[in-house]
Amino acid sequence: MKISDQKGSEKKRSYHHGDLRTALIESALDIIEELGPRKLTVREVAHRAGVSHAAPYRHFKDKNELINAVVERGFELLQETMARELNTAGDDALAAFAASGRAYLAFGLKYPGYYGVMFSGDLLDPDGSQTLQHTSHAAFEQMKTTLVDCQELGILPKADPSLQAVWIVSTVHGYVSLVNENRLNALVGDNHSMSEVQNYIVSAIFQGLGGSSPD
């Protein structure tokens, strides 16, 4: 959801005896997307969710804990996206490598709000919560596992999988940012479809890591 979509109208969720915690997380994400993180207050989250000002404190002790919950949910969605992509790859290590890249791309484009919050250094307590630290590392560790599998099969040269994974995420992050900020078309025009660009990026990442197809 873009800021421009919200001009002239305030989005307010209607909460009726459902999952209050989820409603609060979604309301917080709406506010961050529309107004920026500095405008986020627990009072406004409660207002958007249609509950009393005291209701959020049944689930979150303060604003930081609420933001952590938003980020945790984002990483959970990323893991779910990655799991779906990896399931299509089966036991093929090269297909799993491509699936990992596609998962990051698909997630970042489908959930721009969550993506922006997850990778914003201005929002989180440096220490964070143990749950957040675990959740945020899970998808990264899965990518490292895929890289190690490719190394063992000779598809990728031996190297530190952590550095390789950072390089992949950095490249994907740049592309997702261009798309979500509506800058990609200004660079490539109408000469290439989004799927063509994405396939090229995944291929370029593989080649950049020194990859070669198995015999």
Image (cartoon, rainbow, N blue to C red):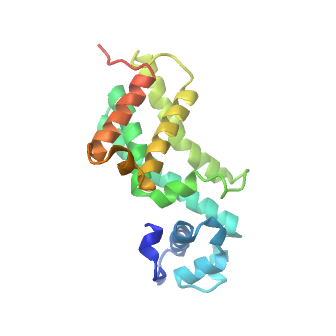
In the rendered view, tell whether residue 60 sits above or below residue 75.
below
In the rendered view, tell whether residue 7 sits above or below residue 94.
below
Q: Position of residue 163 (x, y in %)?
A: 57, 28
Residue drawn at 67 percent across, 51 percent down: 130
Q: Position of residue 65 (x, y in %)?
A: 67, 64
Figure label count: 0
Seen in the image, is 160 located left or right of residue 198? right
Whether residue 193 is visible to the viewer of this picture, yes or no, is yes
Which of these two is toward me, 177 or 160?
177
Which of these two is toward me, 96 or 16?
96
Whether residue 87 is visible to the viewer of this picture, yes or no, is no
Q: Position of residue 100 (x, y in %)?
A: 41, 38
Residue drawn at 41 percent across, 15 percent down: 154
Q: Quadrant of the C terminus?
A: top left
In the rendered view, tell whether residue 125 sits above or below residue 29.
above
Which of these two is toward me, 151 or 199?
199
Which of these two is toward me, 14 or 3?
3
Residue drawn at 69 percent across, 64 percent down: 64
Q: Position of residue 112 (x, y in %)?
A: 46, 57
Q: Quadrant of the N terminus?
A: bottom left
Seen in the image, is 136 located left or right of residue 178? right
